[in-house]
Amino acid sequence: MSEWPAEFREILDQSFVLRTTFARKDGALRTLETTYGWSGGREIILSGFPGKRDWVASLARNPEVTVHTVESNRGYDISARVEVLRDREERLPHLFAFVDRWSERPGFPRKRFAFLLGAVKVNLRLGLPWWGPFYVARRIFDGMPCVLLTLKGDPVERFGPAPAVTPPRLARNQSYSGMGESH
């Protein structure tokens, strides 16, 4: 890992990536833009809003993914193995790292999340119970997906663009041609 290109490490530290995996329901390859937390090592954490997510089920069923960098003069691809974390004590440090990174991005509400996360961390460090507003925070963290990607091998420089992002799936009664049209 120490021989990873500096540009690759910088991209992981400051940018977002694409991930390609197989869809759970139909087995089709899907490439999605991903916000993540990075440990500085071989681990990337994926998360998002609380609730069940199809992308988590797809990753649990097909735990081999490829991570593609996109914001640089050079592109890199690297394989990763997925583990969906379910235990609260195991998940919390990873979720905190994810929210820390997410809250660094521009935008007013994100700064509030950084402040609230700081309060939750102090509460836990002091060994206090999840009471009052911290109970609500615990419910939110318990509902957030937590997926650990372990990067395997070394990044491979890609010549050419990253794979195109797969369009979102539509409900059975929708079509792409009808989007944006008023009836």
Image (cartoon, rainbow, N blue to C red):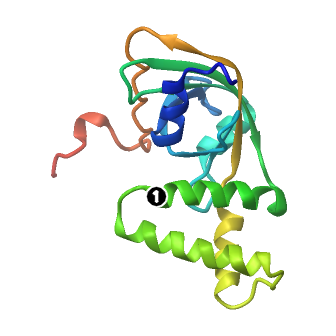
- Left or right of 36? Residue 135 is right
> Which residue shows up at 48% across the image and 33% down it?
11
Q: Nearer the viewer, residue 72 or 174?
A: 72
Q: Nearer the viewer, residue 56 or 138?
A: 138
Tally the marks.
1
Q: Nearer the viewer, residue 104 or 56?
A: 104
The percent coordinates of residue 12 (x first, y second) are 53, 35
Residue carrying label 1: 104
Q: Nearer the viewer, residue 46 or 164?
A: 46
Image quadrant occupied by the N terminus? top right
Q: Quadrant of residue 147?
A: top right
> Which residue shows up at 43% across the image and 44% down it?
171
The percent coordinates of residue 65 (x first, y second) are 64, 26
Vertical placement of residue 174 versus 81, above or below: below
> Which residue shows up at 60% across the image and 27% down it?
21
Vertical placement of residue 182 versus 109, above or below: above
Vertical placement of residue 141 versus 166, above or below: below
- Left or right of 16? Residue 174 is left
Vertical placement of residue 67 versus 147, above or below: above
Residue placed furthest toward the left? 182
Q: Amino acid at mark 1?
A: Glu
Q: Quadrant of residue 23?
A: top right
